[in-house]
Amino acid sequence: MFRCAKLPWSGLLRASVTVVLARYGIQGVWIVDDVLNPHAKVTQRISYVHKVKHPGSGGFVNGQSLVMRLLVTEAVILPANFGFYQPDPVQQRWRREEKTLRRRGVPKRERPPPPA
């Protein structure tokens, strides 16, 4: 039933959290937290996977970045929203090409401009 409905789920979650907070007079601080989930080198079937710097080893791994919005109060921490971060593929391609052209010694005026 809910799969076919075109409902704004993130907006509904935000509205319901706001109603609960107002009803009970809960006040706190909104924070944004991101979590890196490293995965194996072959990750063809996992969504939102990209190369990230691994803090433990200092190298690069394929991983997911989960970004959460939390309300921190004196008594409890409430999750309000979440999403996966993925870098823009157009921006990544431009950076790769820019790096290659710099190595070749192409002047800046002859290199393509950065994407919007």
Image (tube, rainbow, N blue to C red):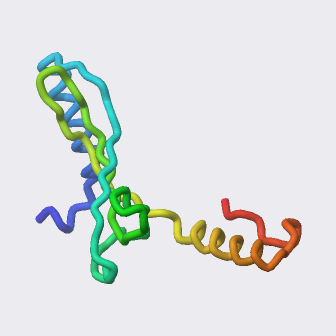
**Quadrant holding the C terminus:** bottom right
Give the total number of marks visible in the rendering.
0
Q: Residue 22's spot in the image, x, y percent?
A: 19, 21
Q: Residue 44's spot in the image, x, y percent?
A: 32, 83
- Residue shown at 52%/65% (left/top)? 88
When the figure is inspected, residue 104 is found, relative to residue 65, above or below; the finding is below
When the figure is inspected, residue 42 is found, relative to residue 28, above or below; the finding is below
Where, by quadrant of the figure, is residue 75 drawn?
Answer: top left
- Residue shown at 53%/71% (left/top)? 89
When the figure is inspected, residue 98 is found, relative to residue 27, above or below; the finding is below
Extreme residue in the top direction: 25
**Quadrant holding the N terminus:** bottom left
Horizontal placement of 47 versus 73: left or right? right
Horizontal placement of 109 versus 21: left or right? right
Where, by quadrant of the figure, is residue 41 drawn?
Answer: bottom left
Q: Residue 11's spot in the image, x, y percent?
A: 29, 44
Horizontal placement of 14 versus 3: left or right? right
Where, by quadrant of the figure, is residue 92 drawn?
Answer: bottom right
- Residue shown at 34%/67% (left/top)? 63
- Residue shown at 69%/72% (left/top)? 99
Q: Residue 67's spot in the image, x, y percent?
A: 33, 50
Horizontal placement of 19 versus 93: left or right? left
